[in-house]
Amino acid sequence: MFIYVAFPSFFIMAAIEEEVIHWWKDDRGESHRNALRLESEPPTEPNGFPRDGVVVVRIMNSASQQAIRLSPDEALRMSTQLLSVAKDLLNQKRIMWNRHED
């Protein structure tokens, strides 16, 4: 899926790379939606000078949305940390299951 982002003199095609949606109910039983979306914008060459592409992390809920634009270096740094933390949490759970089974 692509999103077209309008700028005064050109259009940038942002691709939706991944989206994680969580539904939840409040105290009154009403359903609400939260979403975490990962988007990318390709590298550009304004005035013949190459510019990095952009990774956009967007958080959306029923009422609003917020986004942060990351350089490829920042995105790699964050993804490396996310991978490390996720592996550690899965390993901790595995250890707990092993103790539970013994």
Image (cartoon, rainbow, N blue to C red):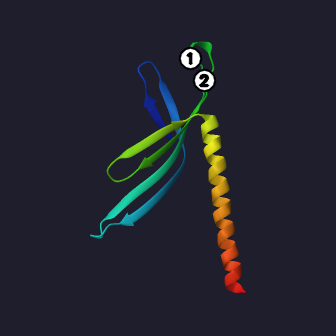
List x then y, in percent, for residue 22.
45, 61
Element assignment for label 2: loop
Query: Label 2 is placed on what type of residue?
Result: Arg
Vertical order, 41 against 98 (above or below): above
Q: Give the CA distance from mark 1 to mark 2.
A: 7 Å
Vertical order, 26 against 9 (above or below): below
Is the residue under label 2 in contact with that under label 1 (CB below 8 Å)? yes
List x then y, in percent, for residue 30.
30, 66
Vertical order, 86 against 70 (above or below): below
Element assignment for label 1: helix
Q: Residue at x 67, y 62 (%)?
A: 88
Instruction: In this rendered view, identify the residue nearer to me: 88 or 48.
Output: 88
Q: Residue at x 65, y 72 (%)?
A: 93
| Labels in figure, total | 2
Q: Quadrant of the C terminus?
A: bottom right
Label 1, on which residue?
46
Residue count near mark 2 (Cα–Cα under 10 Å), binned few <14, some 14–19, many ≥20: few
Please give the label number shown on residue 51: 2
